[in-house]
Image (cartoon, rainbow, N blue to C red):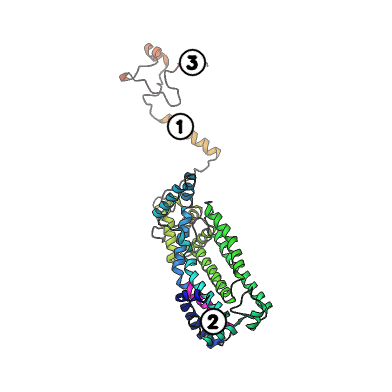
Amino acid sequence: MDTIASLFSFITTPVSWVIVQFHTVYGAIFGPDTGWAWGLSIVSLVILIRICLIPLFVKQIKATRAMQTLQPEMKKIQERYKNDKQRQSEEMMKLYKETGTNPLSSCLPILAQSPFFFALYHVLNSIASNDTIGVINENLLQSAQKAHIVGAPLAVKFTDSSSKVEALGASLTDVRVVTAVMIVLMSASQFFTQRQLMTKNVDTTVKTPFMQQQKMLMYVFPVMFAVFGINFPVGVLVYWLTTNVWTMGQQMYVIRNNPTPGSKAQAEYLERLTKHVTQHNKVGKRRDRAIVKAIVAKGRDRNEFERKFINGLSKANLAAQADGTVIKSDTAAAVEAEDGTPTTATGAPKRQQPKRQSKSQRQHGAAGAKAAGENEPKTSLTKSDEPEDAKPAGAAKKGGAKPAGGTRSKAQSGQRKGPQRPKSPSKK
């Protein structure tokens, strides 16, 4: 164990130095030998590491979103080359290269955090073995061994024997209860974090193998934490529980303010944004403007929730712009003031349904149209008012002269085309 620790001294020494610096601060407040001083030092180490990993976390989110977007294309490649694994791998790598995505980017925070976790494990294990490590000298070693968190020393594990636990001034029952509670909390926080991701921040319109994998990990990770947790010292359990809680809170913030398109979280976010914009007639935050800008740029490719958001703005006489802002739609009011025609929010004439008339109005309108038709001058296509006896005989037989140019005369309105049969004289 000493050989392994010496090989990784390049990381164990900085970790032990950070813990000692935090212990100096908290020791002046709570006492140098208390569990509060050493426990809060470990918690502060976690917070410091996670703050440094925020850029990697942002990159992980972008990589996860990109992988979710590529799932339909990946599925097509798998189906097309299901009998040629080599070609399938080549097409996958080509797809990753064209889109600039990397499947390993989603694992960057875990991979970057692993060395610190490994170093902390060896620091606490050395304290339990009564060995100095890094900048922790004999005095700090004795102080750390006296530190207890709710009756459990920092360096003991769930599987330690009663003699080893009693040598550190604790009882085996207290150690088992404290470590069991911490393992349960650690596994529960991991399960809740993964479940929150699956139920709220996944595009439900696309069913892909990636979703099935994430669902499987939701149950696998908590079991792994429970199995390996019984071999972790109490200080490492404090570290891992703190980082799980941090991850859960960080993910809740991201899901609330930057949800995945097409997810349940996006529907809730756009509903809140619609309410805020319609009340204040503007998009306040830069993050909100970026999301509105992306929705406008999609055009016809918007999903159901995004179309509902645009329609909600239109109902409030607001229009989203290409730069992510919204403006009051005054075009409709100007057109209505000029000609009295109702218009939409875009200024286009609004379609009106004709008003329904009563029976007396319809009869009066028909009588007026008939009177107007009788007063109109006769055209060349109307029948002459002369009696049939006054017409030339040739015209009566042939049905009238043909128009110039040899073209057939057009049928009157309401009559069939072609030569018409002469009407028989009405019987009086």
> Percent position (x, y) of residue 355?
51, 43
Labels 3 and 2: the sequence-earlier one: 2
Q: Is residue 60 shown in magenta?
A: no
Report the residue at 67% width, 80% height from top: 171
Alpha carbon separation for disc pair 3 and 1 = 25 Å
Residue 120 vs 381, above or below: the answer is below
Residue 348 vs 248, above or below: the answer is above
Q: Within 10 Å of the Cα at label 3, are there few (<14), some (14-19), or many (20+) other Cα atoms?
A: few
Residue found at the far left of this picture: 405
Secondary structure predominantly adopted by residues drawn in magenta: helix
Q: Is residue 191 visible?
A: no
> Percent position (x, y) of residue 295?
44, 56
Q: Is residue 383 visible?
A: yes
Q: Within 10 Å of the Cα at label 1, are there few (<14), some (14-19), or many (20+) other Cα atoms?
A: few
Q: Which residue is mark 3?
A: 425
Q: Which mark is residue 132?
A: none
- Amino acid type for the residue under numbered disc 3: Pro
Q: Is residue 260 left or right of residue 163?
A: left
Q: Which residue is mark 1?
A: 371
- Amino acid type for the residue under numbered disc 2: Asp
Alpha carbon separation for disc pair 3 and 2 = 131 Å
Closer to viewer: mark 1 or mark 2: 2
Q: Which residue is mark 2?
A: 131
Which region of the structure is painted magenta? 35-50
> Percent position (x, y) of residue 348?
41, 49
Tally of marks: 3
- Amino acid type for the residue under numbered disc 1: Ala
Residue 286 vs 421, above or below: the answer is below
Q: Cβ–Cβ below 8 Å for labels 1 and 2?
A: no
Between residue 281 and residue 96, name the one nearer to us: 96
